[in-house]
Image: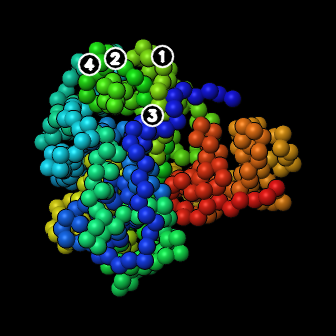
């Protein structure tokens, strides 16, 4: 069995206290917000300030899922996007994309200042860098595009990274923070005066009406409007699961001497790129965060290699020998690279969604919270049309065709996978495998003590067969990114039901 480096927990979670908000109660509010990550919490904060009563409802712990596993860079520089957007949607829309994400950065900065939030907030520059000449042209094109759009860009060939680069586009005066310290502060302003934060309350259904009804834990909450800010909407009607695809990535954290630490936040371009930043620790030190190893959810079973590659990179590029943390993250990419923010369906009056942040959730999640709040308050917002969730969807991009084809292939092809005549010896301790038992696909996990847990391997969302993820010890669905613990409990994604336990 491979020994992985570092403590298997996100630094953001490890360095903040657990929260303990109550379970959902039978109350009535103006706005129910399902999903307490950066979008939901930002919207709840703004709506309460505007005089609405809100209920923020989280399936597990607030600010602990996608928002608790990010690199927490707050920037409008999204690796390489502006040249592509100008090409695909034109200069005016590309400019709005830049302005809205820059507004997300400035919103965080102004709230931190106004509220005096202690969250390691720091203004910093961000860089998209080409390590060698292969990708230099793309970086230069991105710089030209950003300048054309009025964004705070420079082209540089020198950085404080401890290795040479061919060139980088740099955005000045962006920001980084401790995402959970920031979000927990905002969330703590919500309870009271008819508003609530609920945890450990997985919403099973939302019914639109006057009022809307939200069910979780055998309780029903009523609300005039509902925001689904669950990463990917838990309701299928808007088909957002088919307009996006799920991507996993990996992060390690390692103590680094201040003298050797780079200033700024970085992301490489091209294949096998890495994301780099530092963050202060409680003992006065500095933790270097390195991310990378991205792949589609469920497309890879031996995920340990992703962490080992990051460990090798930390050693070869920063001289680091000891890794302190490791964690992984998941996000949904939209095919036109724009998030979907707005109504769930055309016939829908009261249910709103935000999804498809395509790996840049800090600026886009904040911006989505601002936009959702404006939509509820009936305030004009100049980004609404660009991100309209009901816009014509580019189902026919090369990527969308390939992705939806992949989903079909998994749906059909995975039914032929699985060991037929198996014995418990086929599964090693610490390992999970799909077996076929009386024609049914079963996920079998054997823990280190040799105890076997078996689950129905058919995903309760739309019936794809889950795959084993060895580094996270989870069952991951290759179709739309639903993930489950080795005991079958839902971790994330569109499924709202657990995998059924089987006795074998
Ligand atoms: S997440 Fe959609 S079928 Fe599993």
Q: Do the residues labelled 3 and 1 touch (CB within 8 Å)?
A: no
The residue to which callout 1 is attached is 321
Residue 10 at what x, y percent from top left?
Answer: 45, 39
- Residue 251, label in figure: 3
Residue 282 at what x, y percent from top left?
Answer: 34, 31
Residue 35 at what x, y percent from top left?
Answer: 40, 60
- Residue 257, label in figure: 2
Q: How crowded is mark 1: few (under 14 residues within 10 Å), some or many (20 or more)?
A: few
**In this rendering, would 202 be left or right of 276?**
right
Q: Nearer the viewer, mark 3 or mark 1?
A: 1
Residue 267 vs 454, above or below: the answer is: above
Q: Which of marks 3 and 1 is nearer the N terminus?
A: 3
At a point 31% along the width and 25% down the height, the residue shown is 284
Q: Residues within 10 Å of mark 3 (few under 14, many from 20)?
A: many
Quadrant (top left, top right, bottom left, bottom right) of the N terminus:
top right
SS category of the residue bearing label 3: strand
Q: Distance between the residues labelled 4 and 3?
A: 21 Å
Q: Earlier in the sequence, mark 1 or mark 2?
A: 2
Quadrant (top left, top right, bottom left, bottom right) of the C terminus:
bottom right
SS category of the residue bearing label 1: loop
Q: Quadrant of residue 145?
A: top left
Residue 124 vs 190, above or below: the answer is: above
Q: How far apart are marks 2 and 3 (CA)?
A: 19 Å
State ligand 1's quadrant.
Answer: bottom right
Please name whichever residue, 216 or 139, is drawn nearer the observer in this view of the structure: 216
Q: Earlier in the sequence, mark 1 or mark 4?
A: 4
**In this rendering, would 125 be left or right of 6?**
left
Residue 313 vs 498, above or below: the answer is: above
Q: Do the residues labelled 4 and 3 touch (CB within 8 Å)?
A: no
Q: How crowded is mark 2: few (under 14 residues within 10 Å), some or many (20 or more)?
A: few
The residue to which callout 4 is attached is 160
Total count of labels? 4
């Amino acid at each position: 069995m491979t020994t992985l480096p570092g403590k298997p927990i996100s630094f953001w979670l490890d360095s903040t206290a657990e929260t303990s908000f109550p379970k959902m109660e039978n109350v009535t509010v103006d706005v129910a917000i399902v999903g307490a990550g950066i979008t939901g919490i930002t919207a709840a904060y703004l709506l309460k300030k505007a005089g609405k009563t809100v209920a923020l409802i989280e399936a597990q712990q607030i600010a602990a899922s996608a928002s608790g596993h990010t690199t927490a860079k707050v920037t409008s520089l999204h690796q390489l996007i502006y040249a592509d957007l100008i090409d695909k949607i034109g200069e005016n829309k590309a400019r709005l994309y830049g302005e809205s994400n820059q507004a997300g950065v400035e919103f965080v900065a102004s709230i931190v200042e106004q509220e005096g939030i202690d969250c390691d907030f720091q203004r910093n520059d961000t860089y998209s860098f080409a390590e060698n000449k292969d990708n230099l042209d793309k970086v230069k094109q991105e710089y030209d595009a950003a300048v054309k759009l009025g964004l705070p860009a420079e082209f540089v060939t020198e950085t404080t990274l401890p290795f040479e680069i061919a060139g980088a586009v740099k955005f000045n005066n962006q920001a980084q923070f401790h995402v959970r310290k920031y979000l927990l502060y905002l969330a703590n302003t919500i309870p009271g005066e008819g508003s609530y934060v609920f945890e450990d309350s997985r919403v099973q259904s939302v019914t639109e009406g006057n009022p809307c009804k939200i069910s979780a834990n055998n309780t029903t909450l009523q609300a005039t409007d509902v925001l689904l800010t669950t990463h990917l909407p838990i309701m299928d009607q808007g088909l957002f699961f088919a307009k996006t695809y799920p991507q996993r990535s990996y992060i390690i954290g390692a103590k680094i001497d201040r003298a050797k630490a780079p200033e700024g936040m970085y992301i490489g371009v091209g294949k096998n790129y890495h994301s780099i930043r530092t963050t202060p620790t409680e003992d006065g030190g500095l933790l270097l965060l390195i991310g990378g190893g991205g792949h589609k959810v469920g497309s890879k079973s031996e995920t340990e290699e992703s962490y080992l590659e990051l460990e090798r990179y930390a050693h070869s590029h920063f001289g680091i020998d000891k890794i302190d943390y490791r964690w992984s993250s998941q996000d949904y990419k939209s095919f036109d690279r724009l998030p979907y923010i707005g109504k769930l369906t055309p016939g829908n009056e009261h249910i709103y969604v935000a999804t498809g942040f395509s790996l840049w959730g800090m600026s886009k999640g904040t911006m989505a919270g601002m936009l959702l709040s404006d939509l509820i308050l009936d305030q004009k917002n100049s980004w609404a049309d660009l991100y309209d969730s009901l816009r014509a969807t580019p189902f026919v991009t090369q990527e969308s065709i390939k992705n939806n084809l992949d989903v079909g292939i998994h749906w059909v092809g995975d039914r032929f996978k699985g060991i037929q005549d198996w014995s418990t010896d086929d599964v090693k301790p610490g390992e999970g495998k799909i077996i076929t038992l009386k024609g049914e696909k079963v996920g079998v996990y054997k823990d280190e003590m040799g105890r076997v847990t078996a689950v129905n391997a058919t995903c309760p969302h739309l019936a794809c067969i889950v795959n084993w993820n060895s580094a996270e010890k989870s069952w991951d669905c290759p179709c739309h990114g639903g993930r489950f613990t080795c005991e079958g409990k839902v971790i994330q994604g569109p499924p709202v039901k657990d995998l059924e336990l089987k006795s074998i």
